[in-house]
Amino acid sequence: MLSGVIRPQRRVLEMNGNVLDIVGLKKYFELKKDRLFSKPKYVRAVDGVTFSVGEREVFGLVGETGCGKTTIGRLVVRLERPTEGSIFFQGTDIAGLAGGELKKFRRKMQMIFQDPYASLNPRMTVSQWVVEPLRNYQMGTPEEMADRTLKALEDAGLRPVEEYLERFPHELSGGERQRVSIARALVVDPAFIVADEPVSMLDVSIRAGVMQLLLGLREKYGMAFILITHDISVARYMSDRMAVMYLGKIVEMADTEGVIKEPLHPYTRALIKAVPVADPTRERTPLPLTGEMPSALERPSGCVFRTRCVYATDICAEREPSLVEVKDGHMCACHLVERGEI
Ligand code: SF4
């Protein structure tokens, strides 16, 4: 189904302890036609992705810019409508919901954006910005809203909270702005948060504090996270499990230490090798990777990674590898890994 979108329908999955079950999720963006009768072209931003997120779990989505990880985040919180597939949130498929049906679920799913400078309204004070979602969802009396706002700001580490209430975004540092965004997400008591590159625009000195804050909130609020990052060391620090993405597909997925200590897919091996190590004595070896990521419009046949893979053989151009379990819970999409040849 390329041109259509999913019709509203209520589909229910048996409760399995997961907050989210994403099944066969696709998002194709249609490009503007340059001629009246030319065939439409699609960018396959997300192309058949399946994964689950358990309660209180931090699930990392890792990959280069353009791999589709941010689009997945936007689909999951339904800022975008999927082309195909299911998004089971606590057992109910929200992929095709709209209007009032969707609004019932929206409060439970929040997103923190990458850019703390662009994500706040410059004309609203901190307190106005954080209380706004409570007003939108009509959550409690004015006194209750005020209490919730103070608590969310305190939990986000903005203390003494009274000093921040009347400040505007331009009066805050980058780290403080990101904490205000976190407070706005927390204030409605969500079941999960999608954190899209939450520390990538912050100074290195304040990154660790924000990462620790998010992990502490997972414990305190009992919620799950999808962590979107291009930085595999951030994913290692924060996530319990992770999926590595390339050109709209998951190429490897396992518990985080399994991926870091025993990467299977050639792309994951290259990503891990590319992480800088502060050891001038360590010998530099070339990355097992060639060229640049191709355009999502000109996808290679067979394995999407084959144009950059140093191990590619004929079968890689002929047949697309499936994401299969190679060892206990460790999934990989590579013909040669599946056959035990690399
Ligand atoms: Fe490389 Fe082939 Fe494996 Fe793709 S399937 S990652 S091209 S070896």
Image: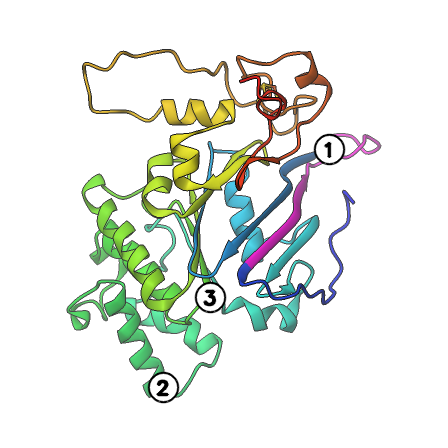
Is residue 129 visible in the rendered structure shown here?
no
Direction right: furthest residue: 37
10 Å neighbourhood of mark 2: few (<14), some, or many (≥20)? Answer: few
User: Residue 16, position in %: x, y?
Assistant: 58, 62
Instruction: Identify the residue under disc 3.
Output: 191
Q: Spatial distance from mark 3 to mark 2, Cα to Cα?
A: 23 Å
Label 1 SS: loop
Which disc is residue 41 wearing? Answer: 1
Q: Residue at x 29, y 50 (%)?
A: 211
Vertical comparison of 237 with 98: above or below: above
10 Å neighbourhood of mark 3: few (<14), some, or many (≥20)? Answer: many
> Which amino acid is tagged 2?
Pro
* Left or right relative to 147: residue 79: right
Which disc is residue 142 wearing? Answer: 2
User: Residue 227, position in %: x, y?
Assistant: 42, 48
Which disc is residue 180 wearing? Answer: none
Q: Residue at x 52, y 39 (%)?
A: 253
Label 2 SS: helix
Bounds of the magenta segment: 20-41
Magenta stretch holds residue 189 = no
Image quadrant assignment for residue 32? top right
Sooner in the amino-acid sequence: mark 2 or mark 1 = 1
Vertical comparison of 325 with 115: above or below: above
Label 3 SS: loop
Indicate which label's residue lies in the foreground, 3 or 2.
3
